[in-house]
Amino acid sequence: MTALSGSSAHAPVAEDIPTAVARLRAAFGTGRTRPLADRLDRLAALRALLTEQTEVFQEALRADLGKSAAESYRSEIGFTLNELDHTVAHVEEWLRPRPAAVPEPFRPAEATVVRDPLGVVLIIAPWNYPLQLALSPLVGALAAGNTAVVKPSELTPATSAAIAELLPRYLGETVAVVEGAVPETTALLEQRFDHIFYTGNGTVGRIVMAAAARHLTPVTLELGGKSPVVVEPGADLAVTARRIARGKFLNAGQTCVAPDYVLAVGDTAAELEKELVAAVHELYGDDPAGAEHYGRIVSERHFDRLTALLGDGRTVTGGTHDRAARYLAPTVLADVEPTAPVMQDEIFGPILPVLTVPDLDAAIAFINERDKPLALYAFTESAQTKRRLAEETSSGALNFGLPVLHLAMPELPFGGVGGSGMGRYHGEYSIDTFSHLKAVVDKPLV
């Protein structure tokens, strides 16, 4: 096992929250997290954690969400390793002071922009990708030179326990893990942090932001929203359906950037429905309940919420479910009314409503009448449609031809806008999020 010097061979005894935060602030105050070599050491230790404990995390993710080993590696462990390796390859360049032009009246002088670490940051992770969304932000926090408290989700107890046991073992005294539910999160939010990074829903996001305001703490809110898919006539509907189905039903639909609903333009809906049936069968066979790579709903509460939405349209495929197993089949609904309950909030499950709109104008109006989504997807061969969607809508990201893809590209910023969040991360954007961009001016005395 590779770990930083001074770390314990066993999970530390749980600290009370103020003591943990004070310890991390003291560690940051020594300056030990600032040198590039220390940052790289901590990133190497995080890499060792992911590679040496792969099977532990895969077993935990299977217990919590029914994820196969392959999906856990691809969407959680491997995803985070990709983010980490990209950061290690570029962090020295990102941290170099950047020269700035000096106006002529103030010359001779030198001006630079320096990225300073913020201090102690809090990362509150959700349950849908409980490893990735705890550790991927941590990559940026460590690379930026900070210490960190990580709060995993109580809804994925096996993964939370694995993080709590292993993360301090590998990363030593510059991280702390706080397990628990609402009381522990509330206690954390009473502390003063230098940045809070929250991934989850808008309701809790407002609570986080209100708590942060008491200490004037900056926040990054990675929220969600109903990410639409526009499908125009002329698109290859077989390819379109396969790509929508893969993006939608990954992790049993429990993905913040999953396609939430389809706006089928003109007469595309009927043929698209047939192709979606074929795509689901191609992905999961005759019985998705037996498919190794099809997951489960995180809890009975979320299962009950989702099954209550099944009557909101005509069932094209799916709809079968088993509460004891937390299983809900990949489901496509048609003839859905815009006012139906399934269209009011983010679905966050394996239910895909298909609505018909007469033309692109109607599709754009439908999108713009609602909260700005975390992502907007479109399948079209029209350059004019692509231009109009880029110019006439607002979303955290815009993808043509494939949902979810932007999430896996570390050189792209990931984040929402309006109701889908604020702030961004991944790659260099994570360094900016967890740093203060300090202006430095040096004017000679003679």
Image (tube, rainbow, N blue to C red):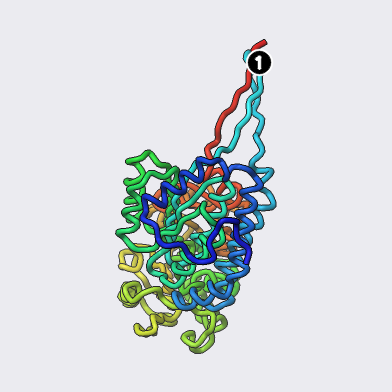
Q: Residue at x 31, y 68 (%)?
A: 340
In terms of image quadrants, where is residue 282?
A: bottom right
Left or right of residue 88, residue 403 in this image: left
Spot occupied by residue 384 in the image (x, y as percentages of width and height)? 58, 53
Spot occupied by residue 240 in the image (x, y as percentages of width and height)? 57, 70
- Residue nearer the viewer, 129 or 131: 131
Amino acid type, residue under disc 1 in the picture: Pro
Residue 43 drawn above or below residue 255: above
Q: Which residue is mark 1?
A: 444
Residue 63 drawn above or below residue 43: below
**How many numbered discs?**
1
Q: Residue at x 36, y 55 (%)?
A: 16
On the question of residue 325 being in view, the answer is yes
Left or right of residue 182, residue 175 in this image: right
On the question of residue 397 being in view, the answer is no
- Residue nearer the viewer, 27 or 85: 27
Spot occupied by residue 18 in the image (x, y as percentages of width and height)? 36, 50
Q: Residue at x 31, y 73 (%)?
A: 301
Residues packed near mark 1 inside 10 Å, few (<14), some (14 to 19) or many (20 plus): few
Quadrant, the C terminus: top right
Q: Residue at x 50, y 46 (%)?
A: 27
Quadrant, the N terminus: bottom right
Spot occupied by residue 279 in the image (x, y as percentages of width and height)? 55, 79
In terms of image quadrants, where is residue 400?
A: bottom right
What secondary structure is found at the residue carrying circle 1?
loop
Residue 52 drawn above or below residue 377: below
Residue lying furthest top: 446
